[in-house]
Amino acid sequence: MLLADPTAFAARSAKTVGESIGVSETMIIRFCNALGYQGYSELQQEIREVIYDIRTAKWSNDGKESDQSPYSFKQIMRWDQTNIENTANHMNPEDMDAAISKIVDADAVLVAGLHAAFPMAHWFTFALDLLKKNCHLYRPEFSTHLGAFTDQSVLVVFSYYRYSLHPIRLAEKAKEKGLFVIAFTDTTISPITEYADIVFTLEIPTRSILQFAPVTFSMMNALLSGISVKSNANIDFKEEDKIMDFFVQ
């Protein structure tokens, strides 16, 4: 329901949303906590900000503002294309090569991202798990300890505006333990940069997750492609057993 009708979460109480889908208010709050939010109100506030951005943003076409409504899907896709191109032009190839090498050589990889960044962390863990073993998704509702990781392990963190404290504290502890930290974030002054060995920043004009996501997934795809080439691995999405194992973790 959150993806199908986000306005319901933006306008209704947790109790009302729960009643509409046949679950308790407590279940809705647990769902919010599982995504890394402190409670329903924090999730609701972020949804309202995203919806506001959708309704008020002026998308550009060939560098010129347009007030046309409804928005053209071509304009939006061109905007994403521009953001991806700008980010690619500002990325350091040496950082990308180093990140690929560190992940390929790592004895284990932990991937973290909460709030709107959680789907990115989830997908990256899923895809990386098809290329190499011992990849783990950070879940704050479980007891995640760094005891199983070594100074040969890698932490990959997705940290965007409204920066959740959990991944930042995790990165801090990982650095103390000697893990190599790779961060995806929205600005060079993001809190996560203090603890990251390599930082990939987005070159986009706003703080909208709707613009973060396409660029981030493109960056992840480039990183995974490099890992596949360097490790001589091929992603086989027909490996049903491995996929099922991932989803029941």
Image (tube, rainbow, N blue to C red):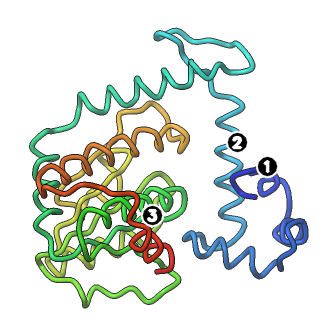
Q: Nearer the observer, disc 2 or disc 3?
A: 3
Q: Pointers 1 and 2 in contact (CB under 8 A)? A: yes
Q: Crowding at label 1, few (<14), some or many (≥20) Cα neighbours within 10 Å?
A: some
Kind of residue sitting beneath label 3: His
The residue nearer to you, when weighing 78 against 11, is 78
Horizontal side, residue 100 vs residue 201: left or right? left
In space, the residues marked 3 and 1 are separated at their CA atoms by 24 Å
Q: Is residue 174 above or below residue 101?
A: below
Tell me residue 8's x, y (percent).
82, 54
Asked which secondary structure carries label 2, the reply is helix
Q: Earlier in the sequence, mark 1 or mark 2?
A: 1
Q: Quadrant of the N terminus?
A: bottom right
Tell me residue 132's x, y (percent).
23, 67
Q: Earlier in the sequence, mark 2 or mark 3?
A: 2
Q: Quadrant of residue 15?
A: bottom right
Tell me residue 114's x, y (percent).
49, 65
Q: Residue at x 35, y 44 (%)?
A: 187
Q: Is residue 45 above or below residue 17?
A: above
Asked which secondary structure carries label 1, the reply is helix
Horizontal side, residue 146 vs residue 71: left or right? left
Q: Residue at x 24, y 47 (%)?
A: 225
Q: Nearer the observer, disc 3 or disc 1?
A: 3
| Label placed on residue 154 | none
Kind of residue sitting beneath label 1: Thr
| Label placed on residue 51 | 2
| Label placed on residue 122 | 3
Kind of residue sitting beneath label 2: Ile
Q: Residue at x 66, y 64 (%)?
A: 42
User: Which residue is label 1 attached to?
Assistant: 7
Q: Earlier in the sequence, mark 3 or mark 1?
A: 1
Tell me residue 90's x, y (percent).
23, 32
